Amino acid sequence: MGALLTACKDDTAGVTTRIVTPSFPGLVLNGQPVVSTAVGAGAFTDPGATGYDSVANTSFPLQPVENDVNLTAPGFYSVQYEAKNVYGYRTNASRLVLVSAVPATDDISGTYERVPNRQPVTLTKVSTGLYVIDNIGGVPDSPEYLFPVYLGLPTETTLEAPPQPNPFGGGVGISGGQIVRQGSTITFSYIVEGNGFGTARRTFVKVN
């Protein structure tokens, strides 16, 4: 008896392979990325955040996954958010929160000059105890060093800046921040922490 042999041909013609490209969810903080609040009792209420899933075409409110703000202790804190879409991809974002013991009327904004190179920098008040500086290093004749960094006054004599985006890579902040007020003369100093900066203490004196 003869055997009946058959063969199958691997024919992939007309077969379409679908490749799913990862799509990360959107995440938008409600309000500003850096805020300040006065020292006090109770719990800090964050403005919140909104997530967006482009796959499902839906948006949804987000609750913090972490909120370490202590209103009784001056300093910087963070509120963390996370958005997740139907594929399980995640996006994270955080808000910096300054708890400040300075009076709401306290204002040290103005033009300062770095000692000794006399490079002017501008300090702009955002809210109670919270400021933005336009040249954190006081670096002269270098446009690439002109970018905003938030500085905070936990008290009237201390200055802080947690790590923030640095165009030179990584984060940039300060350590050892101090403020000296002698009548109308205001001086502040700190060490810049971040790529592109040295380790020297930088001192600035208000001129306007």
Image: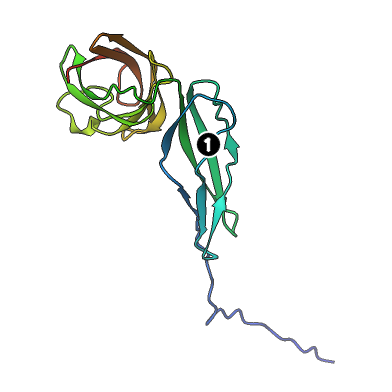
Closest to the observer, 194 or 147 = 147
| The image quarter in which residue 6 lies | bottom right
| The image quarter in which residue 171 lies | top left
- Residue at 28% across / 25% down in the picture? 136
Image quarter where the N terminus lies is bottom right
Give how far across and how far down residue 187 sits, in percent: 27, 12
- Residue at 41% across / 35% down in the picture? 34
Residue under pointer 1:
79
Q: Report helix, strand or loop for mark 1.
A: strand
Up/down of 48 relative to 149, above or below:
below
Give how far across and how far down residue 74 sits, in percent: 49, 21
Asked whether residue 100 is in view, the answer is yes
Q: Which colour scheme is used?
A: rainbow
Under mark 1, the amino acid is: Val
- Residue at 54% across / 26% down in the picture? 71
Query: What is the residue that sits farthest to the bottom in this orientation?
Result: 1
Left or right for 159, reference 39: left
Give how far across and how far down residue 127 sits, in percent: 36, 32
**What is the tally of numbered marks visible in this picture?**
1
Q: How crowded is mark 1: few (under 14 residues within 10 Å), some or many (20 or more)?
A: many
Image quarter where the C terminus lies is top left
Query: What is the residue that sits farthest to the top in this orientation?
Result: 182
